[in-house]
Amino acid sequence: MTAAPSRNIHALIMAGGSGTRLWPMSRQMFPKQFSMSLTGGKSLLHATAERLQPLVPSAHVWVITGAEHATGAAYHDIQPYPHLIEPVGRNTAPAIALTAAHLVDVAGDPIMLVLPADHAITDTAAFHAALEIGAEQAEAGKLVTFGITPTRAETGYGYIKAKTGEGQALPVEKFVEKPDAATAETFVKDGAYSWNSGMFMARASVMLAEVEKHLPEVAKVIAAIRADAADKGWQPAINAHFADMPNISIDYGVMEKSDKVMVVPCSIGWSDVGAWDAVFELAEKDENGNAIQAPAITVDTRNTFISGAKRLVATIGVEDLCIVDTPDALLITHKNQAQKVKDVVAKVKELGGEQHLIHTTAKRPWGSYTVLEDEEGRGYKLKRIEVRPGGRLSLQSHQHRSEHWVVVAGTATVTCDDQVITLTPGQSTYLPLGCKHRLENLGKIPVKMIEVQVGEYLGEDDIIRYDDVYGRQ
Amino acid sequence: MTAAPSRNIHALIMAGGSGTRLWPMSRQMFPKQFSMSLTGGKSLLHATAERLQPLVPSAHVWVITGAEHATGAAYHDIQPYPHLIEPVGRNTAPAIALTAAHLVDVAGDPIMLVLPADHAITDTAAFHAALEIGAEQAEAGKLVTFGITPTRAETGYGYIKAKTGEGQALPVEKFVEKPDAATAETFVKDGAYSWNSGMFMARASVMLAEVEKHLPEVAKVIAAIRADAADKGWQPAINAHFADMPNISIDYGVMEKSDKVMVVPCSIGWSDVGAWDAVFELAEKDENGNAIQAPAITVDTRNTFISGAKRLVATIGVEDLCIVDTPDALLITHKNQAQKVKDVVAKVKELGGEQHLIHTTAKRPWGSYTVLEDEEGRGYKLKRIEVRPGGRLSLQSHQHRSEHWVVVAGTATVTCDDQVITLTPGQSTYLPLGCKHRLENLGKIPVKMIEVQVGEYLGEDDIIRYDDVYGRQ
């Protein structure tokens, strides 16, 4: 059923979410769409883009996300795609309206497919077939939603009720908020209800016209951005005006109000990957119903999900658990209560921890660093720094710390004030407090080095940047 | 009820066990009697010795343990006590017989109290009262056992059946192996049965005479050791002959056969701390029945034990679990199945792991080191080394690695071939492959340093020792 790209379809992948319900793997500064994989190493975002091939050529896959991701941990995840950056988050309607306007102006008013970055779809052929049906409707001027045929009386999703009728696409009678369990049961039996997948399709100009009709406040900001874009370019124009947008969802702002909305009911193996129980549901299981994604020893263990990395996880006499082990935080939740992870995240914030915000390994445009030791009052901090081939850290200095660098892999080029030296594995250098220094990898393999910081204050904010190839301040 | 030390009592604390059922906190090279505390920082061994005060003066508290502990991780735990070292493990009878002979020869044939190193007793006054009763019996030539009045139909302990009679000490009718649940129920109802605590008391010469009577093979080796001890000293004589001992327990070899055995039934808040459920039982609990000994956030969590150190542990919707988090291994067990930890340990061994054997932090006579990074094939290993004031590592060299040392606390004195230098926090040195080097702390506060090893082979056995103040090879 996979069709050749005969239609002009552009996709918009919305990658602005913070995915707290998949803590501790998903964190605010590197959320699940970038940090998690369900399919052998590819991030959810990347899998979302690949799943569109060949229906939407990769050059037509747009990503919209926040500035903290675009220049931060997700820099390399976003670079391959044409992208727009939201200087501040304003929910889905402004992002979709903006992209619609942009596509009208620069891409010849294509059909626009809007997708969350963090969903899973296991039946790609059925998905493509649904997209074909949707595209026909979109070409006919409709706003198309994709309704997932319910497989259970789920209370965690909104529902779409179709009008009675025949056909692969049906007019929408109404959108329904998350129901209680009894109501959900009646929806499943009724047959006219499907889950709202959060995926939409429309011709860009149609979407824009509906925004103008139902969300004049959004349309006004769009007009200002378009006016400026001609002179300044799009991104600077977005940066200048986007904060004026109201915070509103496309469902509430447009879909629930428009009379052009159609639903394409489909069964495509869809999951919103909303919480650990959903990840467990999608994972491959052994004969005891366990999904083991860690070095683990299980004794009398059933229906349990174990995710980890290096540490050994041993379980005895447990069932129905999701266990998620990360270097600085461990989650053990009954799978039926996985939604409450957000309560844990709220508590971490309240207690002033950082485990909701950042990972022990922080990705950067030039590579990554992993904090190996960092305890208040110890007077030192220890990091492993990895620099990609071609990666170049900013030229910087520190007010409160000196640094020892020991190279353990690759060839590092180190600038320290007027000197430039080259270090190979087993070689080291010392960067006194206050010196202007830079680390770069001019080689072909990754540089790994151990950094020992010594000083009275060791916060990440003790950094003066003189020059940065990634445009960071 | 605490009595002054009016009698000549010596205690023998048997500290040779490997405590695998309290994995991952207890490990073969640093087992629970040294590595675990139930009472604010004191090891189980140290608590066992302290609990005897003032009944047994600390100079009369003997420790017997294996060589791997006495010169290894438990060096500083054993040093404060007079001690005997078993060059090889041979179960309890040889160790007790040896100590009895030693006490007859060097301590004027005192009353000898034998205690496992790893038990908990919460009612010290009642314990001392029981010891007084036992001491009277021992002075009268009896072998005294301490029988714990059962508080439940426990199937994990052996039982002692007393003969019918009156008095605070009763003749023993028989010893009974671990019963099944139904039999245990009848024992508890019967009233004549108590738990075998593994604690004994006898005059040293009486114990020795019983060994001669029932265990002639043991007595023969004892005779050889005594003969040699006059010339060589005791420990060298033990080292020369101990391997000839049969492997046999005091219960099986002597207690079950002697006609001199009495039992002192007592209620002293005793626990063998045999598995994590027992540790949980002894721990202080909050209003939800949880015992939290880690940074933790608990949501809808009941009757759960959490032990950890630095990492955040979050639980949601779980109950009746024991969660034990260590840097390289995590255990999650239903509390009623905690006995099966030994199956996990067996599996770790089988898989060739080291988590059953050693901790990430390895204690040494001079201090400790913590492996922070060590991955096969990476070409480097990272350690934090801590040296006690006065601590001195061996003069050593390596065939396959160079080392970078960065001092982060204290003042380190470093020998490297002909040079001796002093390093303060923020200073570093480089030790080329093959150089003869030594690290020592001549200061008053601990030295902490980060060591980066670089080389093709990074095993702990790449070490040539030229000189060691702790007598290690």
Image: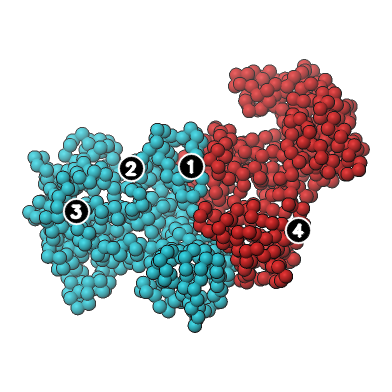
Chain colours: A red, B cyan
Q: Which residue is mark 2?
A: B282
Mark yes or no: residue A14 visible. Answer: yes
| Badge 3 and badge 4 both on one subunit | no
Q: Nearer the viewer, mark 1 or mark 2?
A: 1
Q: Which residue is mark 4?
A: A467
Tell me: A420 left or right of A385: right
| Image disc number at residue B296 | 1
Mark nearer the N terminus (1 vs 2): 2
Check disc 1 and give the amino acid type.
Ala
State the residue at coordinates (20%, 74%): B229
Mark nearer the N terminus (3 vs 1): 3
Name the residue furthest bottom. Answer: B418
Residue A206 in which image quadrant? top right
Q: Which residue is mark 3?
A: B54
Measure the C-alpha gap from mark 2 to mark 3: 24 Å
Mark yes or no: residue A6 visible. Answer: no
Residue A43 picture location, percent across and down: 69, 46
Q: Nearer the viewer, mark 3 or mark 1?
A: 3
Measure the C-alpha gap from mark 2 to mark 4: 59 Å
Chain at tag 2: B
Tell me: A244 left or right of B315: right
